[in-house]
Amino acid sequence: MADQLHAVIAGAGIGGLTAAVALSRAGLRVTLLERARAIEAAGAGLQLAPNATGVLAELGLLDRVMQAALTPEHLRIRRASDGVELASFPLGVIAEARWGAPSAVIHRADLQQALLERCAADPAITLEADAPVKGFAETAKGVEIACGRAGASRSIMADLLIGADGLRSTIRSRLGIGAADQPVWSGRTAWRALLPANQAPKGALKLETCLWLGPKSHLVHYPLRGGALINIVAITEDDWRGDEAADLWAISGSPGDVAPRFSRWHRDARLLVGAAKEWKRWPLFDREPAARWTLERVALLGDAAHPMLPFFAQGAAQAIEDAGALGRAFQRTHEIRAALADYEGARRRRAADVVIASRRQGAIYHMSGPMAFARDLTMRSLGPHLMMSRLDWLYDHRGRS
Ligand SMILES: Cc1cc2nc3c(=O)[nH]c(=O)nc-3n(C[C@H](O)[C@H](O)[C@H](O)COP(=O)(O)OP(=O)(O)OC[C@H]3O[C@@H](n4cnc5c(N)ncnc54)[C@H](O)[C@@H]3O)c2cc1C
């Protein structure tokens, strides 16, 4: 097709890969440029909330993704000090009926693999690794994208550029949002471990999905890969900001750093944390919601647009929502400015709401003393149905067109 639009996407994370599929379905040719020297499966567990699985269904990706995912039957919330159950939600049973799509957990590498397979099978999508995007210039005819490592740099002309290049986005830094637009450090660290289920403590409920609330910290665990692995995420308050240049998937933490932080927690949590021998460590950042996401031919997507704290487990889910909205906008029109304005209009306010709600949720999860006592009392008195109704705004993807 001579006048087929050509989109370049910077970044082949979950957001960039899903956006490539969405744009190809809308009739565009797509080039994905990834900075990493090779695209390697990386990461740990991800919860895929119904607002994400709903979009994956719309993009024809859900059946393949669900082959590698699990649907947790229940989500239990327990108190760290004595293990008392504060609430239990029948997520597996009610998600589809209530929010129109399933709730799932999956290894990020398996989700990435499903998306990579779909991109590789699509002649309209080209994926290049070792191709860092350095900058861009909008012209009357298109957008000129500078990419490649020193000594091998080149420029690519495209009709539009999508910046799906993560928390420290190069594209965002050139959007003219202002010098004050920087990652905001939360004062918290996420510790992540993948525990082989056969190394889990005796009596551990290996298929259970559980959120533990303790003073200034919380712990989440759920099964992956048919129950062969238990994904553990522990979030604590910390003064470590990480190293900006480091690959976030590769910073190790030692068991001796993690276990003492849970020494006063209920035995079930203590034993689980103690059983994990390898930890990865993440400093947690978000950003203030941006005043804009787009120029005439350039738009942000995923963490580049709205990095958020993981207290609602929504970062990848919101990137997937972005991809769905971008695809819908180009289904409606191939007039680039109109489509990007449509996309921004559909997404910017909603993503900002989730960024702010995630901060608020962090403050609630990490309460201590009398505040925590009041929170626990409220949770127990509300009951699962009222508590789930508080998630309708977040999880119900239907009607977002
Ligand atoms: C502890 C923790 C738990 C989480 N749990 C969940 C969860 O349960 N559910 C959920 O939905 N989300 C969760 N998230 C959030 C989720 O992991 C991220 O929001 C999501 O992966 C972001 O995807 P992305 O594609 O936007 O960005 P990224 O995954 O950061 O991908 C960006 C890509 O761009 C590439 N890149 C960077 N710069 C350039 C450049 N200049 N040129 C070309 N390529 C470039 C990078 O190499 C990378 O591949 C969690 C996050 C944390 C920290």
Image (tube, rainbow, N blue to C red):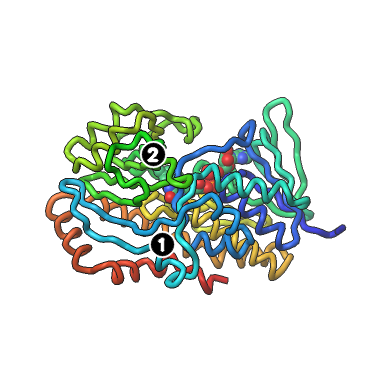
Q: Nearer the viewer, residue 369 or 39?
A: 39
Dividing the picture into quarters, in which one does residue 259 lie?
top left
Please state which amino acid type lies under the numbered disc 1: Gly
User: Under tag 1, what secondary structure?
Assistant: helix
The residue that appears at 42% across and 59% down in the rendered structure is 354
Tell me, yes or no, if residue 42 can be seen here: yes
Q: Quadrant of residue 27?
A: bottom right
Under circle 2, the secondary element is: helix
Q: Which is nearer the eye, 184 or 93?
A: 93
Find the distance from the CA under tag 1 to the CA under tag 2. Answer: 21 Å
Q: Is residue 154 left or right of residue 107?
A: right
Q: Quadrant of residue 77?
A: bottom left
Query: Which of the two marks, 1 or 2, is nearer to us in this view?
Result: 2
> Where the C terminus falls, by quadrant?
bottom right
Left-right relation of 100 to 188: right
Residue 386 higher or lower than 176, as above or below: below
For ligand 1, tell me if the residue under mark 1 lies within 8 Å: no
> Where residue 333 sits in the image (x, y, percent)?
71, 69
As shown in the figure, which amino acid type bears the numbered disc 2? Ala
x and y percent of residue 293 in the render?
56, 56
Q: Is mark 2 within 8 Å of ligand 1?
A: no
Q: Which residue does the numbered mark 2 point to in the structure image?
A: 197
Q: Residue at x 41, y 37 (%)?
A: 194
Q: Does label 1 or label 2 sit earlier along the sequence?
A: 1
Question: Which residue, given by chain and number where applicable, does mark 1 sit on?
Answer: 92
Q: Are marks 1 and 2 in contact (CB under 8 Å)?
A: no
Residue beneath the point at 51% across and 72% down? 398
The image position of residue 152, as x and y in percent, is 73, 28
User: Mark 1 packing: few (<14 Cα in 10 Å), some, or many (20+)?
Assistant: some
- What residue is shown at x 67% (from left), y 67% (from top)? 338
Crowd tier of the residue under label 2, counting other residues whose Cα lies within 10 Å: few below 14, some 14–19, many 20 or above: some
